[in-house]
Structures are given as structure tokens and as C-alpha cells.
Image (cartoon, helix red, strand yellow):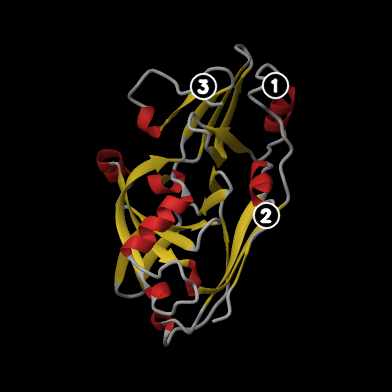
Amino acid sequence: MISHHTKPVDLVDQTLEGAIVTIFLEPDDSIQNRQGKQTYIESLELPHLILNGENVWGFQRHHCVQHTRGAAFDGFSYYGYASGADLFANVSYETRFSVLKERRVNVLLMSSGRYRALEWKAKGGASPVFSSSAPDKLDDMIAAIRDGARFVMALMDEAGLWHVHPVHYPFYYPEERQLHLQTEALFYPAIFEAEITAVAAMADQAEGGILDRDNPAGRERSLALSVEARSTYRSVFADQGYYGLFDLFTTENRNYR
């Protein structure tokens, strides 16, 4: 099998600088579950990113419609890719309300050896307009809001993980000189925050050979899990911390670093 799995050496730095992260994919048509299917190439934008050390989990918005034309609608899902291991994931859930109630999502872990080519791309960058280290310096942010700019937030949580997500609502309240930002809301599995070596070890223990992209049998395997749900949603105040989706019924804010 010919494998070309590449990523920029400075992917973490580029992600934190607001680069647009995408992934180019070409399936390996020699694997069994590709038999009889038409080949293709694809490019996916990964606007949601979680950084743990040198590993990046990049994942799509919840826009994939799973269906069989003329026969069935199977729900919505999205794909996520790990830069630090030969793993990718399909994430699905029935409805947002079911996740809020059960706090679980369904995950199918698979070997990225299913792809003949997998290439991370990071292009462009964002101009920094606000930093929590200088919460009173708001002029650049106000000007960007007036200019109709697109915003991306990079937030380090209490555990030291970076969360990079598109901003859905950028608000500025001039009477209070208060900045309030809200990110897009998407559920993701807690394993996206775990050490990638631990996730890889779990997958390999459950499905031996799944991490060996040159193992024809191993890369056919997958691991289905029901996992604790987390949310990309952050409601962030310039100088008062933030809260997430599962904090809506509390009154205390979390602290970012």
C-alpha cells in the first residue's frame, strides 16, 4: 500500500494564529469496504480544533447528512481527524436535546490507513484584535466588528488545552465597554481532549492492528463507542471568564488562562 500522510511541521502554531485548516483525502480503493465503489478525492474544512500538546483534533461542522438516496435518512454526523495518530472519527447523535439529556455522543474510530493520501493544510492567518492579557485594549476589536470581520477564538481552558472555534456572535456594549463573544455550538466526544497516545492505545487494544496503516486487516477494523459529550460553545467575557453549554444552569463562570 502507498501511504502519504503529511502535516505541516508548524500545524499547532498555524492553528493558534488563525489559519484555515483543511485536510485533503484520497481513499485507498484496495481496502475491502471500498470494493465496487467509485473512487474520489475530497477536501474538508476543519473549523473546530482542539490542541493537546502537539496533537490536533480537527473536526467539521455538523453538516453531513447520512442517507441512502431513495431509501433512508440516517441522521447527521461529522468527521474528525487526529494529527498525532493514525486515527479518524465519525461522530453522530440523534438530536441536540438528546445530548443535553444524556450527555453522550456516538463515535466510530477508524484507521486513517483507509486513505491512500491524507494531507493536512493550514493556509492564511488571522490578525489578532483582542488578547485576554490586555482586556482593556478594545479599539482593534471594535473596529473589526464595525468592519464586518470574521472571527476565530483561541481559548486555553483550565486544563491547559487550546480550543479554537469560529465565533458565532461578537458583541460589544459601549456603555459598559464590555466585550462578549459566543462561539459556534457543536457537540464532540471527550476523547478529543484526551492524550492521543491513550486514545491510540485504547483503540489498538480493542481492535488489534487498527493503527498499522500497512496492515490490510487492521485498517479495515473500527471501534464503536458511546462517549461523554463536550461542547464547543463558549460564552466569553473580556474580563469575567466564560461558561460553556453544560454550565447554562449554573451562575459561576469558568476561568481561562
Mark 2–mark 3 Cα distance, whole angstroms, equals: 29 Å
Judged from this view, the residue extending furthest toward the bottom is: 36
Q: Earlier in the sequence, mark 1 or mark 3?
A: 1
Q: Which mark is residue 224?
A: none
The residue pinned by badge 1 equals 138
Asked if marks 2 and 3 touch (Cβ < 8 Å), the reply is no
Above or below, 130 against 21 in this view is: above
Quick one: label 2, few (<14), some, or many (20+) residues within 10 Å? many
The residue under the point 63% across, 24% down is 132
Position of the C terminus by quadrant = top right
Mark 1–mark 3 Cα distance, whole angstroms, equals: 16 Å
Observer-side mark, 1 or 3, equals 3
Quick one: label 3, few (<14), some, or many (20+) residues within 10 Å? some
Amino acid type, residue under disc 2 in the picture? Ala
Above or below, 110 against 179 in this view is: below
Mark 1 residue element: loop
Amino acid type, residue under disc 1 in the picture? Leu
Asked if marks 1 and 2 touch (Cβ < 8 Å), the reply is no
Amino acid type, residue under disc 3 in the picture? Gly
Measured as percent of width and height from the top left, residue 38 is found at 49, 83
Observer-side mark, 1 or 2, equals 2
Q: Nearer the viewer, residue 50 or 92?
A: 50
Asked if marks 1 and 3 touch (Cβ < 8 Å), the reply is no
Mark 1–mark 2 Cα distance, whole angstroms, equals: 28 Å
The residue pinned by badge 2 equals 122
From where the camera sits, is residue 189 visible?
A: no
The residue pinned by badge 3 equals 241
The residue under the point 67% across, 31% down is 145
Mark 3 residue element: strand
